[in-house]
Amino acid sequence: MTQEIIILCIAAFAAGFIDSIVGGGGLVQTPATLITLPQYPVATLLGTTKIPSLLGTSIAGLQYAFKVNIRWKLLAVMCSIALVAAYAGSKTVTLITNSFMKPLFFLILILVFIYTYTKKDFGLAVEKTVSREKEFIWCSIIAMLLGFYDGFIGPGTGSFLILFFISILGFDFLKASAHAKLINIATNIGSIIFFSRSENILYQYAIPMAVCNFTGAVIGARLAVLKGNKFIRVFFLLVITGTIIRFGYDIFVKNK
């Protein structure tokens, strides 16, 4: 158990670090948890990862919130929708088997890598003008879809939210990250409510992982301001590449 905790804590630290900068920390933390603890159901492992994700996302979100102008009314609507959708997604995941989920994670990892690699100007967008009506419609749809996705699958939700805020609303990187983190807090809470009620959280792993995720998030959020997006983009691609290789090995080689 000690070795498992060490591995998971390292993954949680990396996840907190990455998630606080560009989102997608779950792309490291969730596959690492599935691989390290294969004896548990997927629902239990996903529930366990939500505790460290919540703590790391919360500290990162607070640090960003002090540096950018937050759209609080828009955020309140999205958080409310996302929380309920995440609860529904987490409830659905209890019906899905490991054999279905692992290839799906692998595919998502590849798609996120391709998008991040090909979009060279990620996070360098400028403010766009979007009507309030269209903005509300888009934000409600995205909050529902990604809220459910975060509760059902999880990895990459923060990255997808950032991509939405940049490409549709025209937010710059820091502003998109701040809003994404605060919405992620809501989705994590929605999932934790369900997983805790259904006793699908391994607290002996979740608590030490939360401490490490928190530490990584503090360091990552500060580094994001100092180093900028280009440095983080390269780092993120390297981490995803390593995760794809390791997860692909687990699916196609180890299980043969």
Image (cartoon, rainbow, N blue to C red):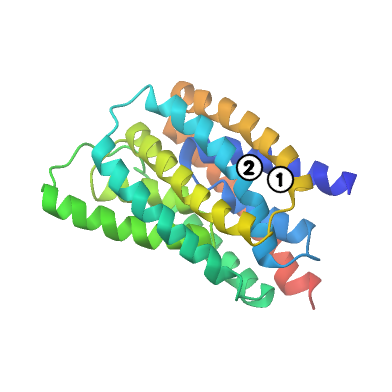
Residue at screen point 52% across, 49% down: 188
Position in image of residue 101 (x %, y %):
61, 71
Q: Which of pointers 1 and 2 lies earlier in the amino acid sequence?
A: 2
Label 2: element kind: helix
Residue 10: tell me if it is visible.
no
Classify 11 as above or below 118: above
Viewed as shown, does residue 230 lie left or right of 96? left
Viewed as shown, does residue 253 lie left or right of 231? right
- Quarter of the picture holding the C terminus: bottom right
Residue at screen point 44% across, 24% down: 225
Viewed as shown, does residue 184 lie left or right of 119? right
Position in image of residue 82 (x %, y %):
39, 54
Between 156 and 52, which is closer to the camera in this rendering? 52
Residue 170: tell me if it is visible.
yes
* Residue 52 - label: 2
Viewed as shown, does residue 54 lie left or right of 114? right
Residue to which mark 1 is pinned? 206
Q: Amino acid at mark 1?
A: Ala
Q: Are marks 1 and 2 in contact (CB under 8 Å)?
A: yes
Q: Amino acid at mark 2?
A: Pro
Residue, far front: 197
Classify 210 as above or below 193: above
Residue at screen point 67% across, 42% down: 12
Position in image of residue 158 (x %, y %):
46, 47
Please rate how many residues cluster around mark 2, counting C-alpha atoms within 10 Å: few if below 14, some from 14 to 19, many from 20.
many
Label 1: element kind: helix
Residue, far right: 2
Residue at screen point 71% across, 60% down: 34
